[in-house]
Amino acid sequence: MSRLTKAQREQVRQMFGGRCAYCGEPLPDRWHADHREAVVRALLTKQSEDGRYKLVSGPSLYPERDVLENFMPSCPPCNISKHSMSLEVWRKWLAGHVNSLNAYHPIYRLAKKYGLIQETCAQVTFYFERVAQVVESAV
Ligand SMILES: [Zn+2]
């Protein structure tokens, strides 16, 4: 399934009411249909006519993941950030941002000292998980 039909794309877009499955923000016009479990494409070396080599995207390493059920609607920043990470690896990576900010960004530390930023130690919970919790608690 390398390309979704227009109807399938609309089906994916509406999965969470037109919101990004990960952050919950309304999807912009140029939203992404993300593979929840990445298809991960091989990189191939190809020689062009001028003799130079370049890297080109090759076949998927997980073609079984290229199915409609594996698509999630995503805003571009979330999809680009997630890249080919699994959800659990991405969740840990996102959670680690606070440590990086504390370690490398004096402006962040200064803003924290003046109470402009408060760290919550909140777990990273994706929007589709929060929606599922609401549905479960209503049952
Ligand atoms: Zn998002």
Image: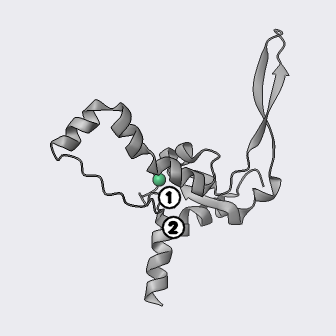
Identify the residue shown where x is 42% and y is 44%.
97
Residue 20 at x, y = what percent?
49, 58
Does any atom of ligand 1 lie closer than 8 Å to the CB of label 2? no
50 on left or right of 126: right
Classify 94 as above or below 108: below
Identify the residue shown where x is 76% and y is 25%.
55
Mark-to-mark CA distance, 2 and 1: 6 Å
Type of amino acid at the residue the image marks with label 1: Tyr
55 on left or right of 7: right
Residue farthest toward the bottom in the current orientation of the protein: 139
Residue farthest toward the top in the current orientation of the protein: 50
Quarter the N terminus occupies:
bottom right
Asked whether 54 or 32 is in front, the reply is 54
SS assignment at label 2: helix
Does any atom of ligand 1 lie closer than 8 Å to the CB of label 1? yes
CB within 8 Å, label 2 to label 1: yes
Asked whether 26 or 64 is in front, the reply is 64
SS assignment at label 1: loop
The mark tally for this picture is 2
75 on left or right of 3: left
Identify the residue shown where x is 61% and y is 66%.
11
Q: Residue 128, labelled with which disc?
A: 2
Q: Residues within 10 Å of mark 2 (few under 14, many from 20)?
A: some
Classify 66 as above or below 114: below
Residue 71 shows up from this direction: yes
Sequence-wise, the earlier of marks 2 and 1 is: 1
Type of amino acid at the residue the image marks with label 2: Phe
The residue tagged 1 is: 22
Residue 111 at x, y = what percent?
21, 39
| Quarter occupied by residue 101 | top left
Residue 92 at x, y = what percent?
52, 52
Q: How is the image coloured?
A: one colour
